[in-house]
Amino acid sequence: MDISIIIVNYRGWKALDECLESIDAIISKTFSFEVIIVDNFSNDGQFPVFKQKYSKFTFIENSGNNGFSNGCNFGASIAKGNHFLFLNPDTKLTLEALETLLQTEVSHPEIGILSCLQINENDVFYKQNNLFPALGRFFGISRAIFRKLNKSKLEKRFNNTSDLFYPDWVTGAVVFINREWFDKIKGWNEDYWLYFEDVDLCKKVADSGGKVAVTRKATIFHQHGGASRLNVKTKALTKTEVIISKHVYISNQFSIGIQIYLQSLLIIGVVLEKTILSILSLFLFFIPKLKVNRLMLKNLFVYYFNALQKQTWISPRAMNYLKPKA
């Protein structure tokens, strides 16, 4: 088997249906592929429906909503392909894109992770000039200043006309990696429940001497946010997990001194911002979006209390929560 396409789903059935339809239409005479859908226990009655509708694909049900990293690793554990394509359910795939990813990766063994251009429903291409979080550019303002000061250097790096360009990391929506590299970096890090797991994955490749690349010769449709932000409560949960994953990334990637500095700044900044917005939401109750901040503030206080009590930054939702480090 040449390629295993691995898709992690959680109640994103409408988007998944369109994704699987696009894959179902792919017929290749030059390479073989399988499709594995890991459902993170949606538990809404749709799993058997889709399993029957797309009977030539492999459907496996996870034991719970165990996060994106765990779902990806679960899918990879039963995959037969020499290459893995981790794909979001809110994407649409073409034969040309799949063929290009395979050919590019095979002809460039120095590439550990490969992605491609992504376009949304408004025909807008996603910016893929991502840089690893660092001490001088971890937060929004410092990151903007860094990009401003290094504008010409970054434009030269990302705005060339080459078939390939090399960001520090690529989004987990489209990740093409061969089995050898996947095994070398020991897969996705299950310290993360949702968000920043793609940054961590690319960092592991970079630290192991591999390159992270994007090919301009292929484009995949990606409806950003289509599967994770369904309502106010879900939006508050996912936005809280973004912050939690930042704490996890800091604890995994920085020395103790820098950790203390960044963790403190993150806590102070987030709590102050959400407190102010929560107070405003009491007066501006007619703006539904502000309610998200109240829910987030509550979620964060629970998380910080738990982190202090359990002595870990890892989200209680993540599979590595309170799991001894190897």
Image: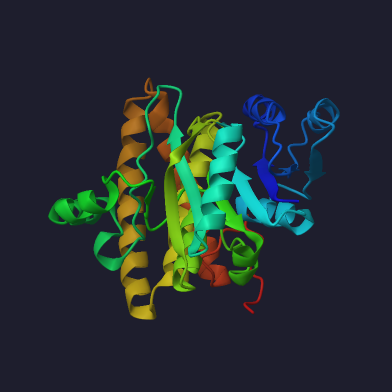
Q: Does any portion of residue 112 appear in the rendered image?
A: yes
Left or right? Give the position of 65 relative to 146.
Answer: right
- Residue 33 lies, in percent from the top left, at 72, 43
Foreground of the two, 319 or 225: 225
268 with respect to 241 (left or right)? left
Residue at 33 percent of width and 25 percent of height = 284
Image quadrant where residue 14 sits: top right
Report the residue that reaches farthest toward the front.
Answer: 30
In the figure, is residue 158 to the left or right of 194? left
Which residue corresponds to the image point at 75% horizontal and 42% vertical from the top-left?
A: 41
**Which quadrant of the rendered structure holds the C terminus?**
bottom right
Q: Position of residue 258 (x, y in %)?
A: 33, 74
Left or right: 226 in relation to 119: right
Rendered view: 258 above or below 303: below
Q: Nearer the viewer, residue 147 or 138?
A: 147
Residue 248 appears in the picture as rendered: no
Image point (38%, 31%), residue name: 290
Classify 253 as above or below 65: below
